[in-house]
Amino acid sequence: MNSSDFRRVEKLCVAAFAITLLASCGSLGDTGAVKEANELAIACKTNEALRAVDRAARGGGLGANIADLQRVVILRDAGRLSEADAALAERNARAGADAEARAHAERSVSKSLQDLRAERQKQTGRRVCS
């Protein structure tokens, strides 16, 4: 097998993995609601953002999985830390997350919060809501 053949096989394997991953989620769900929630959070509309997260969660699939962590990000951004901690604990329990998965979720939430605040800074000139 030459390098060109290897690259084709490698691309096929990556594509197959992506399809399998998406199939395991069942569906994409309401990923538009996740995007909307992020935009609302950037605009400091926390309660509206949480309602959009609720819609995404009800939609199931990948959107619901993302919504679980997005809820934590939005709550932390709003300074609602006890609610955020409870939401993350509930998500981890529901997912049966082991220590490694919990640590990964925490890193994802922290990175997403940094990204949200950086985007708010870019759009509005301020990192946090007043």
Image: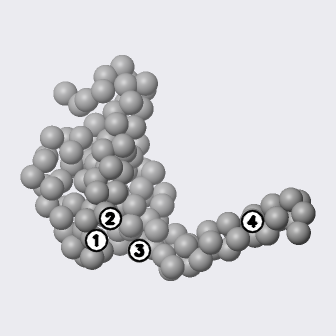
Question: Which disc is residue 10 wearing?
Answer: 4
Viewer-nearest of discs 3 and 4? 4
Residue at x-position 48% and y-position 76%:
25
Residue type marked 3: Gly
Q: Secondary structure at mark 4?
A: helix
| Dots 1, 2 in contact, CB < 8 A | yes
How far apart marks 3 and 1 lie (CA) works out to: 19 Å
Lower sequence index among marks 3 and 4: 4
Q: Earlier in the sequence, mark 3 or mark 1?
A: 3
Which residue carries the number 2 mark?
101
Report the residue marked by disc 3. 60
**As rendered, which of 101 and 51 lies closer to the eye?**
101
Q: Residues within 10 Å of mark 2 (few under 14, many from 20)?
A: few
Disc 2 to disc 4, C-alpha distance = 27 Å
Q: Amino acid at mark 4?
A: Glu
Query: Which residue matches tag 1?
Result: 97
Q: Position of residue 3 (x, y in %)?
A: 86, 59
Q: Position of residue 30 (x, y in %)?
A: 46, 65
Q: Is residue 109 left or right of residue 30?
A: left
Q: Position of residue 8 (x, y in %)?
A: 83, 65
- Of the two numbered discs 4 and 1 in the rendering, the one whose residue sits closer to the viewer: 4
Task: Mark 2 or mark 4: name the one nearer the start of the chain.
Answer: 4
Label 1 to label 2, Cα distance in Å? 5 Å
Q: Note whether 101 is above or below 78 in the view shown.
A: below
Marks 3 and 2 in Cβ contact (< 8 Å): no
Q: Earlier in the sequence, mark 3 or mark 2?
A: 3
Looking at the image, which residue sits at the far top? Answer: 125
The percent coordinates of residue 66 (x first, y second) are: 40, 61
First in sequence: mark 4 vs mark 1: 4
* Residue 71, placed above or below residue 1: above
Question: Gap in Å between the C-alphas at discs 4 and 1?
Answer: 30 Å
